[in-house]
């Protein structure tokens, strides 16, 4: 009796101890996700920003040895957008030069950063890529070819193959972002149906939880209707007397609470959408909704309040799925919206007396594509994630040095000799962005090369993963 | 000394005050208004036996009327050093910066004039508040403050009334003149580099002697018998509205159209009116002392109403979009002082003191403007008397607790401040 009691007490003590002594092992850290995980910035993937991606910063701060990323040389793939002029109107475009090249395509193992720009949750589960296809000059599956390389294994499979000790997964942004970039929420085209998302998220996280012993942090999806790509262009023209005249969309004048995307900038410059009487008006409205012309998606550039509500509802539904699935599978949830809403609401605060906000070009956080962060924004994400990891796992990972990110080398003066080349978001910039976030058009994607039909891939390629996978239904 | 000479001396004191003087004190209060009191750790409220009683306990002047007319003036030279060590995320672990070496010399000058056996008039000019920080060029906190000079001059007439042979009271007026001079960098994101850029600086300064406000003070001094004395002094809060100018200077970034865009929102190259308001805290000091022929021992507790200093608004009425408010959130504080004097002979006296002064500043508002900490002070001094003249020399060494913002800085400027200060002063006195 006494002995049994002793053993019980000891067991209770041990349980107590193991619960108290939390920690996390960053020996093999793998990041799954999309462009936000890859360190994509200003419409392209390039070394300088990849090295400042939030997974790279977390790995560096946590002391992960050899955190490998699919680095791309300057000027990036695709060639990064740059600011050509600021006045009288900002001109953003990519210089007409040859794109960069993969730097370490021969790395003999999966990359630790498996974030694939443009990837949806579906892609994480089912899409592969072949570096030989890319090197042969084919542009049909650039990002998966560049990052997954072996033509055989999906991002999820590669992550499991690395047997990571720690995993972050930030996937699902592209399951809703298309609705914002293309100005139109279309079920199954620019946004993923809720039931599909739930099934796929459970499959993906279940596979990770079952086939690895990693600590897993999943990241929620930010409000894509609050990014500068959506919020920068006003739905009206301000007259000299301060009054507003609404822009004209294909469904009529725009209300004050409508959003006009950056894709409209080039059209407005040509006179589209300008109300009659405004100099330069060409009498044509701004296209509000996505159109498919010859198999090519032409974006709508307007989000009316009901569309914004649909996007926000869908994001909230996805986030609930992420939270519920994580809770069922023992993953921790890093809610990016605490950081994101403080940034977009302008109460993020200051660093060293410097104010950072979500303003396009001048806010410091977002890059020239209006969708993705630049180095400072990725630094803030890493900062916030490190705080979360430290709180959740009782670790004491040192914080990133934001001064070095704001002011590399401590010199904020800026090189005087790097004067801009010569003097709106160019059409070319808009197209570049659209290609990365091409919607899933029925019957088959044109801008992405999946390895088979939805159903076929699910039964083949994930068989290994799904075998014994923890089904959460 | 004739009336004429007295007037000359007063003007000399006034001239002294016009010399740029500022300093580094508890929060930004200064207690060095006479080098006898300083050498005794500032434990002078229950001693109050020289003209610096005008600050520490004006009622004590009533028991000095046997000395006739007294004039006393001097200065305290403050040499302060401060090193900053950064913490992540900004400006990052391992970052260090130091303040430039500066010496401040807040002066003090007093007249004590016995009107009759009951009434004694006193007048003092002193600097009860002062702050001066000046950081090395291009340090990482330059967008918060590069340099600040803040000072409050106090011109205080007071009337001490001897109620009995044991008790005296006083009432006085504080006519305060404030000055503030603040320079900080302007940092914005340069959209071309997508990095922070130094786009200019703003120099904010108030008009010479034009910003004034009134306060008042009252005190009690009592002889308790058996060599014991006690004192209580209260000096009121002083709310001061200050006006001046802001002057903006642009730094070219190398990107002409960005510079033009910045120039369109900031009025570079011109002065624009500036308004601010500072609520200087009230002060209550209570002391008890004992003395015999050779020894004086004095202890005292002081309370400063620093919670008056909640923020520092910087308003540009013509450019409200550039106005800011620096959050301060100070808390009331308590200070403890202990002093001793040993009169070796009628000519020489030895003095010593100890003090502990709490900082009113929360970690959140520690910044390059002022990074304060609790301070412990050790003082020594020497007094020399010859006929109608005397000289007091004192030295006070202040050790500040090294203190970190602990990740809570309002400015997002994290790190620890390591400070020390040495104060050395000389005061001359003469009586007629």
Image (cartoon, coloured by chain):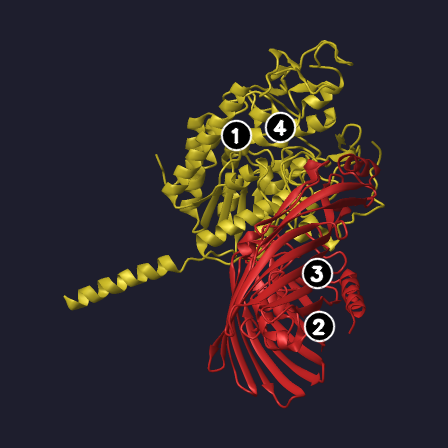
Using the rendered image, report if marks 1 and 2 lie on a common chain. Answer: no
Name the element at disc 3. strand
Say which of A137 and B319 sits in front: B319
| Disc 1: which residue | A175
Q: Calculate the distance from the C-alpha at mark 3 to the C-alpha at mark 2.
A: 26 Å
Residue sitting at 36 percent across and 57 percent down?
Answer: A19
Q: Are marks 2 and 4 in contact (CB under 8 Å)?
A: no
Q: Nearer the viewer, mark 1 or mark 4?
A: 4
Whole-percent x, y for residue B414 in the image: 60, 56
Using the rendered image, report if marks 1 and 4 lie on a common chain. Answer: yes
Say which of A174 and A426 sits in front: A426
Color used for chain A?
Answer: yellow
Residue A231 disc label: 4
Residue sitting at 57 percent across and 71 percent down?
Answer: B60
Instruction: Give the image quarter of residue B104.
Output: bottom right
Number of numbered labels in the structure image? 4
Q: Are marks 1 and 3 in contact (CB under 8 Å)?
A: no
Using the rendered image, report if marks 1 and 3 lie on a common chain. Answer: no
Q: Residues within 10 Å of mark 3 (few under 14, many from 20)?
A: many
| Disc 2: which residue | B72
Whole-percent x, y for residue B89 in the image: 60, 54
Color used for chain B?
Answer: red
Q: Residue furthest front?
A: B116
| Disc 3: which residue | B132
Q: Nearer the viewer, mark 2 or mark 4?
A: 2
Q: Chain of mark 3?
A: B
* Quarter of the image with the C terminus of chain A in it: top left
B188 is higher (above) or lower (below) than A91: below
Q: Calculate the distance from the C-alpha at mark 3 to the C-alpha at mark 4.
A: 44 Å
Name the element at disc 2. strand
Q: Calculate the distance from the C-alpha at mark 2 to the C-alpha at mark 4.
A: 68 Å
């Amino acid at each position: 009796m006494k002995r049994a009691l002793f053993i019980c007490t000891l067991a209770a003590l041990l349980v107590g101890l193991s619960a108290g002594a939390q920690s996390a092992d960053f020996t093999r850290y793998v990041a799954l996700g999309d462009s936000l995980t890859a360190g994509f910035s200003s419409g392209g993937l390039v070394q300088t920003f990849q090295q400042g991606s939030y997974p790279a910063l977390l790995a560096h701060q946590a002391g992960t040895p050899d955190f490998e990323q699919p680095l791309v040389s300057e000027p990036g793939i695709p060639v990064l957008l740059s600011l050509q002029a600021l006045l009288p109107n900002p001109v953003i475009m990519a210089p007409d030069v040859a794109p960069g090249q993969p730097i370490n395509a021969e790395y003999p193992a999966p990359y630790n950063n498996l974030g694939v720009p443009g990837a949806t949750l579906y892609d994480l589960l089912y899409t592969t890529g072949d570096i030989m296809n890319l090197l042969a000059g084919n542009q049909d599956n650039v990002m998966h070819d560049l990052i997954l390389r072996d033509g055989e294994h999906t991002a999820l499979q590669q992550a499991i193959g690395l047997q990571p000790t720690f995993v972050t997964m930030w996937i699902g942004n592209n399951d809703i972002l298309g609705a914002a970039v293309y100005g139109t929420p279309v079920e199954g085209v620019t946004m993923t149906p809720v039931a599909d998302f739930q099934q796929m998220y459970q499959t993906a996280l279940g596979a990770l939880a079952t086939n690895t012993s990693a600590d897993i942090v999943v990241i929620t999806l930010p409000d894509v209707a609050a990014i500068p790509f959506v919020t920068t262009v006003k739905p009206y023209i301000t007259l000299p007397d301060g009054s507003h005249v609404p822009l004209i969309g294909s469904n009529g004048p725009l209300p004050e609470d409508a959003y006009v995307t950056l894709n409209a900038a080039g059209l407005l410059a040509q006179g589209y959408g300008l109300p009659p009487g405004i100099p330069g008006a060409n009498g044509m409205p701004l296209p509000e909704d996505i159109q498919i012309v010859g198999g090519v998606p032409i974006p709508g550039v307007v989000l009316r309040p009901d569309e914004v509500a649909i996007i926000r509802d869908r994001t909230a539904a996805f986030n609930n799925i992420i939270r519920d699935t994580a809770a069922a599978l023992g993953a921790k949830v890093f809610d990016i919206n605490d950081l994101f809403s403080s940034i977009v609401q302008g109460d993020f605060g200051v660093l060293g007396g410097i104010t950072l906000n979500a303003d396009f070009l001048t806010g410091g956080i977002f890059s020239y594509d209006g969708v993705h962060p630049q180095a400072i924004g990725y630094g803030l994400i890493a900062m916030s994630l490190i705080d979360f990891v430290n709180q959740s796992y009782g670790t004491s990972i040192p914080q990133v040095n934001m001064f070095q990110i704001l002011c590399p080398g401590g010199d904020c003066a800026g090189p005087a000799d790097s004067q801009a080349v010569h003097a709106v978001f160019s059409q070319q910039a808009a197209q570049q962005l659209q290609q990365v976030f091409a919607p899933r058009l029925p019957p088959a994607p044109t801008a992405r090369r999946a390895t088979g039909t939805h159903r076929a891939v699910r039964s083949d390629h994930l068989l290994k993963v799904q075998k014994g996978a923890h089904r959460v239904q | 000394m004739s009336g004429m000479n007295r007037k000359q001396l007063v003007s000399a004191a006034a001239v002294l005050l016009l010399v740029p003087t500022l300093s580094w004190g508890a929060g930004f209060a200064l207690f060095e208004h006479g080098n006898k009191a300083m050498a005794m750790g500032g434990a002078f409220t229950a001693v109050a036996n020289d003209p610096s009683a005008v600050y520490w306990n004006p009622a004590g002047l009533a028991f000095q009327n046997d000395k006739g007319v007294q004039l006393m003036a001097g200065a305290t030279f403050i040499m302060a050093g401060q090193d900053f060590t950064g913490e992540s995320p900004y400006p990052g672990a391992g970052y260090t910066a130091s303040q430039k070496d500066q010496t401040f010399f807040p002066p003090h000058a007093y007249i004590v004039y016995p009107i009759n056996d009951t009434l004694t008039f006193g007048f003092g000019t002193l600097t009860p508040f002062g702050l001066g920080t000046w950081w090395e060029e291009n340090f990482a906190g330059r967008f918060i403050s590069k340099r600040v000079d803040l000072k409050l001059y106090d011109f205080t007439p007071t009337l001490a009334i001897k109620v009995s042979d044991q008790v005296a009271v006083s009432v006085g007026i504080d006519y305060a003149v404030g000055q503030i001079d603040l320079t900080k960098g302007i940092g914005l994101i340069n959209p071309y580099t997508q990095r922070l850029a130094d786009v200019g600086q703003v120099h904010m300064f108030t008009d010479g002697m034009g910003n004034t406000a009134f306060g008042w003070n009252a005190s009690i001094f009592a002889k308790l018998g058996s060599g014991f004395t006690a004192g209580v002094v209260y000096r009121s809060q002083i709310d001061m509205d200050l006006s001046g100018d802001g002057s903006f200077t642009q730094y070219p970034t190398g990107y002409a159209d960005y510079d033009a865009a910045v120039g369109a929102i900031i009025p570079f190259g011109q002065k624009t009116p500036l308004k601010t308001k500072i609520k200087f805290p009230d002060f209550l000091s209570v002391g008890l002392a004992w003395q015999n022929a050779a020894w004086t021992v004095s202890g005292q507790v002081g309370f400063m109403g620093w919670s008056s200093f909640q923020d520092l608004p910087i308003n540009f009425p013509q450019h409200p979009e550039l106005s800011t408010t620096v959050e301060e959130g100070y808390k009331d504080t308590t200070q403890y002082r202990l002093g001793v004097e040993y009169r070796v002979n009628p000519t020489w006296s030895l003095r010593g003191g100890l003090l502990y002064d709490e900082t009113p500043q929360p970690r959140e508002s520690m910044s390059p403007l002022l990074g304060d900490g609790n301070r412990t002070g050790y003082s020594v001094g020497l007094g020399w008397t010859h006929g109608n003249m005397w000289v007091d020399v004192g030295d006070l060494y202040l050790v500040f607790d090294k203190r970190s913002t602990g990740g809570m800085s309002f400015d997002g400027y994290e790190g620890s401040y390591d400070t020390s200060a040495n104060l050395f002063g000389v005061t001359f006195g003469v009586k007629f």
